Each structure stands twice: as C-alpha cells, then as structure tokens.
Amino acid sequence: MNLQHKTALITGAGKGIGKAIAVALAKEGVNLGLVARSSSDLESLQTQLKESYSVDVHIASADISDKAQVDSAISGLLEKLGTIDILINNAGTAQFGTLVDMDIEQWERIIQVNLMGTYYVTRAVLPTMINQASGNIINVASTAGERGFATGSAYCASKFAVLGLTESLMQEVRKSNIRVTALTPSTVNTELATNAGLKIGDEDRMMQPEDVAELALATLKLPPRVFIKTAGIWTTNPQ
C-alpha cells in the first residue's frame, strides 16, 4: 500500500523507536504529528524532517499519562493534520525492581504511562478513524508482555495489558476497516533501555530502533484487506 500523503501520529517521537518510525514514514511521504514530553527533542526532529523530506510535520509536547494533556495535544494536531490515518502508540517508560522494593509511585507511573497513556491517546484518535472507516493503529508492546521475569512486575503487567487492549480493540474496530497491530520487540538499543539498566552488550549486534521501524513500515504497507495481529522481532545473535 502506498503511504504517500497519509497522516500519522506518533507518541514518544523524540527519541528511540518513535524517532526512527517518524524518519521511516517521512521517507514514504507521510505527514506527521509528533508527540513527546520534551519539546526540544520534537523541535530538533521537526527541523530535521522538514529539511530532508517534503512532508508536513507538526509537534505537540504532552505527558501521555495525563488525559487532559493528551486531549489538548491530539485536538491541536488534528486541526493541523485534518485527519489521522496511522497511530503509533510508542511512548513508554521502564524501571525494574522487586515488587516489594519498588516504590509504589514508580509502579503506578509505569502502568499510567504504558497502559493508560496508550488508552488515552487511542481514545482521542479513534473517533476520527471510525468516522472515515479506515485507519491503522500500531501499539509498541514488548516480549515482556508475553512472559514475565523477576524484577519486571510493573513493566510486564503494563505490556501484558497493552497486548490485551490491542486484541480487544482489534475485534471492536476491524469491521470499520481499522487494522490494529501489536509489535513485541525484545531489547532494543535505546536510551530508555540503557537508563533502565538493561544489558545492551555489543551495540553493533543488538537490535536498533531502525529495525523496529522497518517492521512497522512493512506492517503498514500490507494490502488493506489483511493485517498482522502481533509481530515479534528479536536480535539474531545477542552477546
């Protein structure tokens, strides 16, 4: 499917996977609405994309764990973009610790960003897709949403929940020609992974954000009559 002149909204777009997907879509001629907490990251990416590709790029700073901020950001971007054909729910956070040792506030924050943020953004965008009877939603989950591990109770719970939300939503909206997909990458070489204390190892052998972006792009380019429900991507030979 040709993506040129489509419109996409990407959360967590300032860095890592979100930024890589923004670049990949801009190369395809997709007009973009970019959301992240850091306005400086967004402004830098907006300048880069406008200089390199003939696409419209609009930005909005928001903490997706705050519904009021989400609604304001999405409303403003919809006014500028006109519509949203593609939603990439990528924004997320990660911290690890045993269930007892992790602060309750940290545990709740992970759920609020990873699950409720995905819900808030999707809820704000979905009516537009239903009205136009078309759309693509990609939720960036994780292998941590498929199997739990020690010290990952909050992160795993949030990503398991995102997978459940994704499948339920898919069943709700597929009759409206809206495709809903979950991507489940293993560890990706991003700032978030490093800050969370994940072992990256040999960076040249680890999965890069651009690899996940390629998978997202391939998913979006499938004929409209089909979609991928869940797609995993793993590093071939990690250190």
Image (cartoon, rainbow, N blue to C red):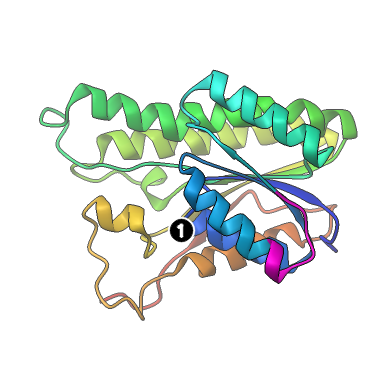
Magenta span contains residue 227: no
From the viewer's perspective, is 211 left or right of 95?
right
Secondary structure found at label 1: helix
Q: Quadrant of residue 157?
A: top left
Magenta span contains residue 51: yes
- The total of numbered circles placed on residues is 1
Image location of residue 160, percent across then percent down: 42, 37
Quadrant for the C terminus in the image: bottom left
Residue that carries the numbered disc 1 in the rendered image: 16
Q: Residue furthest top?
A: 68
215 is higher (above) or lower (below) than 166: below
89 is higher (above) or lower (below) than 216: above
Q: Which residue type carries mark 1?
A: Gly
Q: Residue at x 55, y 63 (%)?
A: 20
The reply to whether residue 191 is visible in this rendering is yes
From the viewer's perspective, is 126 left or right of 229?
right
Q: Quadrant of residue 53?
A: bottom right
The one of 72 and 221 positioned closer to us in this rendering: 72
Q: Residue furthest left?
A: 101
Image location of residue 226, percent across then percent down: 79, 53
Q: Quadrant of residue 186?
A: bottom left
Q: Which residues are magenta?
A: 50-57
126 is higher (above) or lower (below) than 229: above
Q: Residue at x 63, y 24 (%)?
A: 72
The reply to whether residue 231 is visible in this rendering is no
Q: Residue at x 67, y 53 (%)?
A: 228
Image location of residue 59, percent across then percent down: 63, 44
Within 10 angstroms of label 1, few (less than 14), some, or many (20 or more) residues?
many
Q: Residue at x 49, y 52 (%)?
A: 41
Image location of residue 1, percent across then percent down: 84, 62
The one of 196 and 139 positioned closer to us in this rendering: 196
From the viewer's perspective, is 237 left or right of 51?
left
